[in-house]
Image: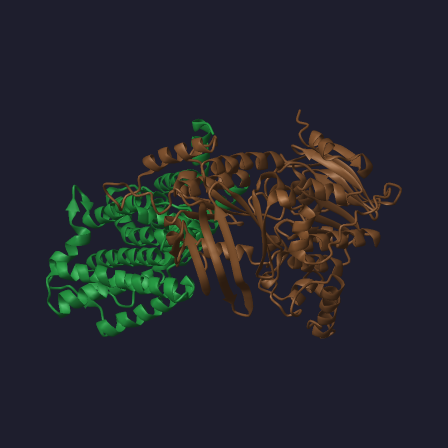
Chain colours: A green, B brown
Amino acid sequence: MATKELTKQRLNSKTTQTLLAFASLILLLLIFSFASPYFFEFNNLIGILLATSVNGILAVGITFIIITGGIDLSIGTVMTFGSVMAGVFITMWDLPIPLGILAGIFAGALCGFINGISIAKLKIPPFIATLGMMMITKGLNLVLSGTKPIYFVDKPVFGLIAAKPIVGIPLGVIIFFAMAIIASFILSKTILGRFTYAIGSNEEATRLSGINTDTWKIAIYSLGGAFAGVAGIVMASRLQSAQPALGAGYELDAIAAAVIGGTSLSGGEGGILGTVIGAFIITVLTNGLRILSVPQEWQMVVTGLIVIGAVYLDILRRKVK
Amino acid sequence: MDTVLVRMEGIEKSFPGVHALSNCQFELQRGEIHALVGENGAGKSTLMKILSGVYKKDSGTIYVRGEQVEFHNTKQAQTHGISIIHQELNLMKHLTAAQNIFIGREHSQKLPFLVDDKTINEKTRQLFEMIHLDLDPRVKIAELTVAKQQMVEIAKALSYNMDVLIMDEPTSALSDSEIEDLFKVIRHLKEQDKGIVYITHRMEEIKQICDRVTVMRDGHYIATTPIHDITIEQIIAQMVGREVYDTVHSHGDTTKNEVVLEVKNLNQGKKVRDVSFKLHKGEILGFAGLLGAGRTETARAIFGADPKDTGEIYIKGKKVDIRHPKDAVKHGLGYLSEDRKQYGLALNLSVETNTVMASLERFITPLGTVDAKKTRAVAQEFVERLKTKTPSINQITKNLSGGNQQKVVISKWLVRDCDILIFDEPTRGIDVGAKSEIYKLLNELADEGKSIIMISSELPEILRMSHRVLVMCEGKVTGILPAAECTQEKIMYYATMRN
């Protein structure tokens, strides 16, 4: 096959959806800029970036899982589990902040690890296994915190994780971008990434190629959990507290971001850049509609329509091909 | 150097409820192409899956190059130089050819957690050169034809420095010219002193390229014979252990019969261009052509599975508008897909459920529930009529052999009272004994007045079964021949009549 043809073919597949998502994002930015003078203000743009960071980190993590053909419904409450663990370490036990951060990330990874064991070894369908984990962590969050928020009142440094400006951009946003770059590297350049696509494309074929798919699936779910843990730390820092009742529903925004970005729920296809754009589309939409004083209820309706529309576009594109 | 590559002795294997292999043996030499034949369920795939580490044997011994080995997974078999190419190709369609071939070995030498696509692309290029395959290593599997995918599988096996290559029905989805290419590669491997196990149902291929043939039947080893010391008839006799139906249908003239289906200037996409033909009552019309000639697409367009762009369809002289399979079924059309497992059967449901699935509304009681007594009776009736081999009508269809699954699909459309049946590769992956039963069934259906379109890539099958043969090439009808005028050469002439 000629190289030119090959380039065309590549453009046809994953890239088209990413370009499409990117074009939609630019379009949304333009529409809102014209509709409201406040939208393109520096502070509002920083607000959008910061608001995207938590969902963005979650979405980047779940992209791996979705590419394997799996799903993780627990990442929202696992994220909060990370926040709460950090709170327990730092505020309740008065341990150093770095240790608390590690505890939060590790707690997330542990939940992901258990998800992976349930799915790969016990053969529980991902939907059910992670639904169970969602309930478990939701309960544990309330138990560990005594149903009350844990405030980092005497640790103002903790708040800087999300807020400390670096050349005008909050650290939380930089963490998000850093996580996205790391994830993109893992997905495209490491064997973990390669096996993520391979498992999603044809798990049995991958297994028959002599690859221990169970182990890799556990690793991928653990990675997704660790990303949720990082999101939990950023979240807790932004709120200066661990809010135990928060978290449920975040997984759906993350899944929506990945899907809008072109990651296929049937596995084998997807990428980090698309997911990042998808996450921004959701925040820009919410933010823009809020600035235009559209009630929150209607914001949800619009986001839902966008998700369905994005997937339908993807289906149309495949048909044309 | 020892010339014996593989020796298997006293192999036993049981699955829950089935004694799949009992006291089986097998031997493969260097530079040998060894045919392994037997009906579906004879145990040949199971035996080879044991040799390649997919299954574990219950007992028995395996020697590779004289050394006794135990395989617990495919990787161990690979390190002993044994590779298998499964009947259902095992590729990851979203990955590139190179990524597929080197899956599990794509890491860079210096940093083992990183993938080194540059190196694997280069190595793949070399492998492709070895088998004279003109293909970019970076092309995604999803973009390739089945034949090319198969070549990628062979390249993958070669990349493991294998000595033993097991091929499970490699030609079942290939056209004649593609088969020639494949044979070239296989002969090339033989010259390099590799051993090749060739599982197939196509007898003519065995004579063409194999050195010895081992026959299995019902999980038992029957015999191993040099190919020059045995005739195809003798091989088949060993395989089935019973009389085979092979009377050729009397190719009477059906063109005087009523026209039940007429297609005029049918167009659909790029694969169906200006197709016109007539189908008569009681006729078997063979659809011949190379893979990708547009035969399946034509059938799907007629059936409404992929609605036609333009063209007219008349059933019994009346113009009909078919936009959806439900319209086709309403007009008495039935379509039996080449991919039974994907489109023909609900694999996890019983023989009974599958049999009545397309006509459930006929089995509804006044209360709105399904009349189980009636559905059982009908399912039972068709199991007996078609001689479907199943322990009971409650058996899950997944557990039946290919031939018997096909009979269940046929039952489904017969229960629906279809008069026009389109069979797409009716005997693909079906063993010799069951094949002849399917042939017999098709002839009986035609004699009863059903009209049949039979799409087949096997020329002997087309010649043997059809009253008339329609040949397609690149989406166009290039010839319609009465059976009496048909020869393999003539069909191939029309099948390659490109503009």
Q: Quadrant of the N terminus of chain B?
A: top left
Q: Is residue B293 left or right of residue B449?
A: left
Number of dots carrying numbers = 0
Foreground residue among B5 and B120: B5
Residue at image location 83% in from the left, 48% down from the top:
B282
- Furthest toward the top, the residue is B499
Residue at image location 31% in from the left, 65% down from the top:
A114
Position of residue B370 measured from the top left corner of the image (x, y, whole percent): 69, 71
Q: Quadrant of residue B361?
A: bottom right
Q: Is residue A302 left or right of residue A88?
A: right
Q: Is residue B361 above or below residue B62?
A: below
Position of residue A79 measured from the top left corner of the image (x, y, whole percent): 28, 61
Q: Quadrant of residue B350?
A: bottom right
Q: Quadrant of residue B362?
A: bottom right
Foreground residue among A298 and A116: A116
Position of residue B152 measured from the top left corner of the image (x, y, whole percent): 47, 40
- Furthest toward the right, the residue is B256
Q: Is residue A265 visible?
A: no
Q: Quadrant of the C terminus of chain B?
A: top right
Position of residue B140 measured from the top left corner of the image (x, y, whole percent): 45, 39
Q: Is residue A218 visible?
A: yes
Q: Is residue B69 left or right of residue B191?
A: left
